[in-house]
Amino acid sequence: MTQTEERAELNESELVPIEKIVSLCKRRGFVYPNSEIYGGVAGIYDFGPLGVEMRNNIRRYWWWSMVQLHDNVVGIEGANITHPRVWEASGHVENFVDRLVECKKCKRRFRIDHLPPENLEKHVCPVCGGELTTEPRVFNLLMETYLGVIEDERMKTYLRGEACQNIYLDYDNVLKSSRMQVPFGICQIGKTYRNEVTPGNFLFRQREFEQWDLQFFVHPSEMQKWFDYWKSYRFDWCQSIITHKERLRFRAHGSDELAHYAKQAYDIEYRTILGWQEWEGIHWRQDWDLSRHSEYSGQDLSYTDPLTKERYIPWIVETSGGVDRTFLYLLLDAYEEQPDPMGKGNDRTVLHLHPWLAPVKVAVLPLQKNKEELVNVSKELYRKLQRLMVAQYDDIQNIGRRYRRQDEIGTPYCVTIDFQTLDDQTVTVRERDSMSQIRVHLNELPMYLFERVTWK
Ligand code: GAP
């Protein structure tokens, strides 16, 4: 399907308001506002019991496909704090800024790159029509922190403003310790901190969030080939875990919006109710990073080809995405409110999450909680499944309500143990999306489920 065709099929009325996801996340334990009992902190969130399971699944799927499946890619996990010179070399101290104007009437602040052009030109507030200040104020997004306790000796540094910097810092160590040769890549998943001036839209723009990065080091003559490879690999990856494929597209950055380190950039964008928004960036970083770190550290980070003996600074293809945005887009993609087709009030909210990423894989449900034989079989089965995958045991309320509860958190399979189980050792397996039910023998059940909830 071409991208034009995909966009033509997009149904805007199906786009889910973010508030519905915020409410579900709080109600069912996916995400909570950070420090809520103190009134919260804008742009900072905590993940609850289901959120942390789903987040771990997202991370693991990324790691599996990027590191485990690529012979020429390895992983690291760098620290959140680095030497302050790193951020001078990277260009962030100088260039990592937001430019804001303020409305003289309502006092709201706007990033000038987010203002509609006519408001920017005429200095008119898009909210109240008041006059905007003409000279933008410049704010650096790096979060400062201090190392050391003695006042005069304390060193000012920064929490990392993009996680990938550790990869350049460890590049030479990885080369020497893991016997990699160019072309090769280093992956990392880690926290990032930005003093966003306008945090908002739930997990979309936060001040503490998580990024995944691949930095892929190549000979300059092979840059285009690898840029194209990773661009399409990452698009396919995003596509593999969403239902609404038509909500995904590429967008090339215009020359006026390129980050200071990028010569070319494409965003993979997901369509939300707020418009098309960035999910992941594929950046042509060229030799910016290794050249700058060579210059600022005084260490030669050039590479000598073992065959040709050519010496050069490798160029870099970067694919950089947000774990939190992935989490948010997957929920927006999966959420559906389905009215009861029979009109009997059995409406359901269902998360059509990919079974690989769903926080709970299976729920074990004894038909009746006061029948000892049913309970014994159910508990034994639950203990067995729990060793293989995240499982829940639920015997509260009637079976219909239990199915609804599991649908709302995206559990792909519910297993019901009933009186027939006692006779023939089969259980009912109910699939979330189709609500179809089949009977599976207890001996075959673990493999039946495992095959369906594990990525391959
Ligand atoms: N190293 C390149 C880099 O940091 P970026 O486009 O600034 O590039 C990469 O960030 C990804 O991180 C974005 O595509 C987005 O998914 C995520 N991201 C960026 N800022 C974010 C924020 N304030 N809150 C949540 N996710 C964010």
Image: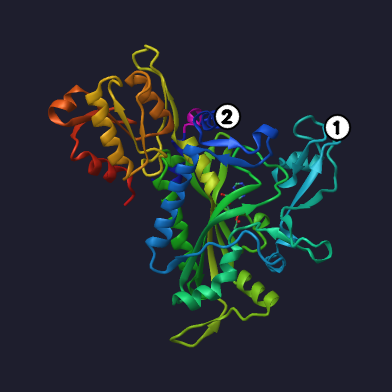
- Which residue does the numbered mark 2 point to in the structure image? 19
Question: Type of residue at label 2?
Answer: Glu
C-alpha gap between disc 2 and disc 1: 29 Å
Does the magenta run of residues contain 360? no
Which residue lies under the disc numbered 1? 105
- Placement of 359 over or under 374, stated as above or below: below
Q: Give the structural element (helix, strand or loop) at label 2.
A: helix
Q: Nearer the viewer, mark 2 or mark 1?
A: 2
Q: Residue at x 66, y 41 (%)?
A: 43
Residue that lies at the very extreme toward the top in this rendered image: 344
Above or below for 204 versus 373: below
Rendered position, 217 above or below 366: below
- Taking the view exactly as shown, the residue that stands out farthest to the bottom is 309
Q: Residue at x 56, y 64 (%)?
A: 284
Magenta segment: does it hold 12?
yes
Point 43% across, 52% down: residue: 60
Residue nearest the observer in this picture, 424 or 169: 424
**Kind of residue indicated by mark 1:** Lys
Residue 341: x, y in percent? 35, 17
Q: Nearer the viewer, residue 363 or 343?
A: 363
Nearer-the-camera pick, 451 or 71: 451
